[in-house]
Amino acid sequence: MDAVDLARLQFAFTIGFHILWPTFTIGIAWFITLLSALWWRTGRTVYRDLMRFWMKIFALGFGMGVITGIVLSYEIGTNWAGYSRSVANVLGPMFMYETLSAFFLEAGFIGIMLFGEGRVSKGAHFFACLMVSSGAVFSATWIIASNSWMQTPAGAVADADGIFHVVDWWQAIFTPSFPYRLAHMVCASFLTGSFVVAGVSAFHLWRGHHLVASRKAFSMALWLALVLAPLQAFIGDLHGRNTLEHQPTKLAAMEGLWDTTKGPGMTVIAWPDQAEQRNLYAVEIPHLASLYLTHSWDGEVQGLKAVPPSDQPNVPVVFFAFRIMVGIAMILLATAITGLILRLRGRLFDTRSFQLLAMAVTPLGFVAVLAGWTTTEAGRQPWVIYGHLRTADAVAPVTAGAVTTSLLIFFVVYNVLMLAFIWFAGRVALKGPADTSPPALEHPGIDRTNAGLFDSDTSAPAAIGGAQQAGATS
Amino acid sequence: MTELMQAEYVPLYFGALAAFCVTVYVLADGLDLGVGIIFLVAPRDQDRDLMMASIEPVWDGNETWLVMGGTLLIAAFPAGYYILLPAFYLPIMFMLFALIFRGVAFGFRLQATRFRLVWDIAFSAGSMLATFCQGLILGGLIGGVPVENGMFAGGPFSFLSLLGILCGIGLIGGYALLGAGWLIWKTDGATQVFAREIAHAALILTAVMMALVSVWSALTVPEVAARWFAWPNLILLAPVPLVTLAVILSAWRGIWNGAEPRTFLLAIALFALGLIGLVVSLWPYVVPRHITVWESTSDPQTLAFIAVGLIIILPIVLAYQTHAYWVFRGKTVHLEGGYGGEGGGH
């Protein structure tokens, strides 16, 4: 492999690994913020227990997100110097604003969020949670804005040296695909987070432990999923039509559509053969793609052959990644609807097969996000700035050897980290939230008056060495 | 007013701002990297728990200044970004690997029961390697990087020099001094005694390496020597090494019998002097001896756009970062919740 492929592989691997953590933490941060607010306003200990429990898992995931993110902010310079030179005027400020408005906000309040309970008032703790969760969304906003500019560039012109200069900041930030992309990504993060909460809660319900807290979390997560899963399908449809308008080649690759067609059918499954420029073993539903893409029976959709093969992305990668994403969306939607049916029948908390299903779909949100990113990023190829700068012209003057070395180390290090995270976060998750609220306190009226009794022993700061002793005995 | 707004001054403001961000990074992350550097030599596990607890709520905010430095560089001085980052490819990558291990150790160490030593080593070795890599970059910067046609034109090991190694060791000493000074301030009892002992050793290492780096760069980099020894610079710049000497002596005397924050504050002063020395040696280059601040700035409309954010948001950032330190002021006690999964309350 040459330096370009190696650099692409390295970036794909490091950003693919990184994207998992923001996806996870955006949703969980807002969940914790909600719990902090509920604990502040109602005083019910079940919210505090859930908040502390999810905060431990969140802290581990957040740390992973921060450090893998720092890697990316430098990798753009080390591996993609040509790209940096070309886009610094446009994207440099967006990256800087991300640091200023998001990273600092998260980092400035994460200490109070994680360690501040008891040191600051409940209201102040809620505020810190709100700042961290807002920071997570601001971060996504700036990153999606810069990514959208690479997909659908606007508001800037390139000079003879290929260096972009901004003529209109508003247009450069609010590019045509930005709103759809942002909504799609944030919704995906919330959806993934709610299925993680549902899955972990289902495990405890299944085992019959931590029932009060787990029922509460299970119910909250499934309500959220019920709203978000259809919403995501709706946003996805809008995004798809936006892609049809602005990146027709990418859309054709997603659909596996080679010839420009009036009223194209939906290719359910096929083997796209790029050398032959056609699909093998295709199963099609006539006119369906035309219906969901153009909202008409006979709309015209541009095919891949409209551009020369050298300007086409790797079609099978885009085609299959897209199908994985959509397939998972269907499964998650079905799970959320099943939850509603069980809830209406009053059997949400004691249907063991549904608990198993909830556990099984826990990781699917992450897979869908990775597949979605693959679709959009691989679909942009061979361009790094769609229609303007080829990926091959964007790399840095570093040797293939240096890139290979760092790629191998990344591969080993990130896998070790993943195992460590699964080990530690999994242990916290399986242990479950502390059960400091006996079932008798479920009624809000009694709960409020007695809350103080059950607080006194847990809210005092631990003695020096407490952590160590507790660690040694467990 | 109008004179100071002239186009030729604008890069100077952004240069000053970049220098400010680097300074905040070095001081803030320096103190928690320093705690990591001396982590393993602490006598008891209890000391290590306390040392980590003293930086746990703030390390993340400190490290964010590293990202700030990178993003400000690409936004304001793109030439510096796309020439220097490939030039220091390997030390940057290894710094990142080290920071990864060090960063996750915060979370995993308290979760670990059986393999805690592994995370202790990851934290300490990670801190040390990250610092050493920063030294290699610093030394490479003073020595200069090969540039042709506005792009980096060297090999993967072009960064390697004796000067870089000296800087790396010096930075380890300096950060250790900052970390030890921080611990003298934030802890008491046996942990504080340990911090005072290690501060002594760190101060000696820092002083020796500062001298060696100064002499060696004057001997091997003619441009640096010309800058310092030209007339009348010699007289104008003489206070820098003299004040440095005074600060070192004052720190030496104050480690055991001075006020508690004294060592930390003097370590900050020492870094500030080192940075002044660096600016004197490298001014006005972003890529030393190739590209000046005037040649490397981005478009005026880009600078105007980021200036709005910097003027409005940066003071707010500084305010709430200070607030975060303020919330956890006083002597460090063990923290409950958060990372400390198994900790406290049982």
Image: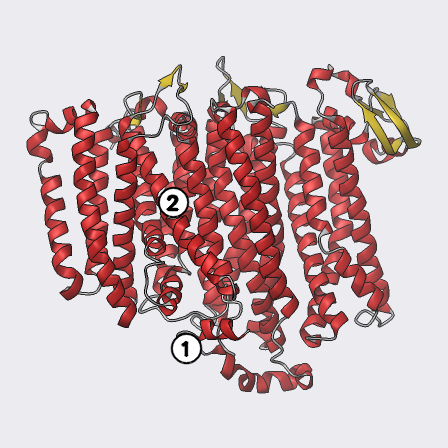
Q: What residue type is labelled 2?
A: Leu
- For label 2, the SS is helix
Tell me the crowding category of disc 1: few under 14, some 14 to 19, or many 20 or more residues within 10 angstroms, Cα based: some
Q: Mark 1 points at which residue?
A: A463
Q: Is residue B299 visible?
A: yes
- For residue A411, the mark is none
From the viewer's side, name the closer residue of B37 and A243: B37
Q: Is A5 above or below relative to A470?
A: above
Q: In which quarter of the image is residue A120?
A: bottom left
Q: Mark 2 points at which residue?
A: B129
Q: Looking at this view, name the residue that lies furthest to the top.
A: A160
Q: Is B277 above or below relative to A217?
A: above
Q: Is residue B71 visible?
A: no
What's the residue at 16%, 64% (across, down)? B256
Q: Which chain carries label 2?
A: B
Whole-percent x, y for residue B71 in the image: 43, 37
What's the residue at 83%, 54% (across, down)? A334
From the viewer's side, name the closer residue of A129 and B83: B83
Whole-percent x, y for residue B251 in the image: 15, 55
Whole-percent x, y for residue A255 in the image: 81, 30
On screen, residue A153 versus residue B101, left or right, reads right
Whole-percent x, y for residue A382 in the image: 65, 22
Disc 2 from disc 1: Cα separation:
33 Å
What's the residue at 73%, 50% (across, down)? A364
Q: Which amino acid does label 1 sit on?
A: Ala
From the viewer's side, name the closer residue of B29 and A187: B29
- For label 1, the SS is loop
Q: Is A85 above or below relative to B42?
A: above
